[in-house]
Image (cartoon, grey):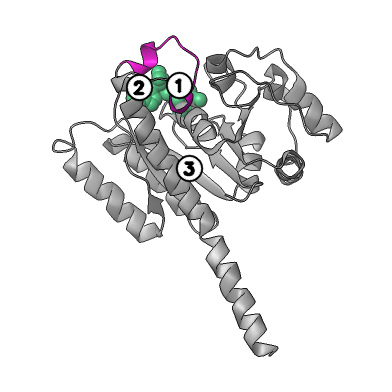
Amino acid sequence: MNTTHIVTVSAYKGGVGKTTVAMELAGALGAILVDCDWDRGGASGSWGAALSDGRLLRALLRDSPPRPLRRPGRPDLVPSSAGLAEWIGDPAIVAGRLRDWAEAWGRPVVIDTHPGAVPMTDAAWAAADVVVVPVGIAWPELRALEGLLAERATAFTLILAPNRVRDRAVIRPQLKALVNMARTYGVAVAPPVGDYPWLPRRRRRSALVLTPNPGRAVAAAAADFRSLAHKVEQALAVEAPELQKQAEVLEATHG
Ligand SMILES: Nc1ncnc2c1ncn2[C@@H]1O[C@H](COP(=O)(O)OP(=O)(O)OP(=O)(O)O)[C@@H](O)[C@H]1O
Ligand SMILES: [Mg+2]
């Protein structure tokens, strides 16, 4: 994976698994997780970092890369700042800063986003090489997804990530609708992540994919998130052969 790739996790709907997916993707990709959601219950909270930590806001104001927090078993994290709620930055400028930081860190970056239509979320979209959209397989969620695709599928590289998928026989019509929608809009669909009822009750703060000696349940869930991460890596790698092809064409024309 190109070291400076940015993966944004976002959706028009709340509660679809953005934060969960962002934590696991960051863990699986060895990325720095930047938490751009200042609400309680976001990645900083699940990681164990305080929202009074102002480093993200300070870094945005000063335009210098923030130093990520490190703990074993958790992705490196730039925690969110409560002050971001009142902060209105220009999304294009903020996107440029996020890209500069990725460059300075020399690491891939995963961004967790606020579910609202806020400038910070727009910035995270604008900075992204790929946007991962977690989606529940139920009609209201699919309708919300259609709105997102109609507005954004042409301008962004999207991966739809079915999450909390259980009993495929029962939800076959919804799954079919999702695949059709993805085809219509020309976007990729990742292998589904299962529904793990113990996950919301889990006390440990480690990412599933980074848990040493996981039990059978954690290992199964971690495997799902690794498959999703693999799909993301594949999407990001598409650029490489194209560049290679361009280089070959140039070489041929210049002798
Ligand atoms: N695959 C899964 N299996 C079981 N529970 C899950 C799964 N993915 C997420 N959850 C649970 O669903 C709830 C919402 O997940 P999460 O906080 O990641 O969503 P979100 O989209 O970030 O929400 P918000 O819009 O509030 O930021 C959490 O309790 C989480 O543990
Ligand atoms: Mg969240």
Secondary-structure class at tag 1: loop
Q: On screen, 201 above or below 183?
A: above
Residue at the spot 78% in from the left edge and 32% down from the top edge: 60
Where residue 132 is drawn, which disc sits there?
A: 3
Give coordinates of residue 179: x percent, y percent.
29, 51
Q: Main secondary structure of the magenta part?
A: loop
Q: On screen, 67 above or below 206?
A: below
Secondary-structure class at tag 2: helix
2 and 1 marks in contact (CB < 8 Å) = yes
Ligand 1 is found in which quarter of the picture? Answer: top left
3 and 1 marks in contact (CB < 8 Å) = no
Callout 2 environment at 10 Å: few (<14), some (14 to 19), or many (20+)?
some
Q: Quadrant of the C terminus?
A: bottom right
Q: Which of the 4 image quadrants contains residue 215?
A: top left
Q: On screen, 156 above or below 160?
A: below
- Horizontally, residue 110 falls left or right of residue 169, namely right
Give coordinates of residue 213: x percent, y percent.
40, 20
Distance from label 2 to label 1 (Cα)?
A: 8 Å
Residue at the spot 63% in from the left edge and 26% down from the top edge: 76
Q: Is mark 3 within 8 Å of ligand 1?
A: no
Where residue 218 is drawn, which disc sits there?
A: 2
Q: Which of the 4 image quadrants contains residue 225?
A: top left
Where residue 211 is drawn, which disc sits there?
A: 1
* Residue range (magenta): 198-212
Q: Say if the magenta span includes residue 211.
A: yes
- Horizontally, residue 147 falls left or right of residue 246, namely left
Distance from label 3 to label 1 (Cα)?
A: 23 Å
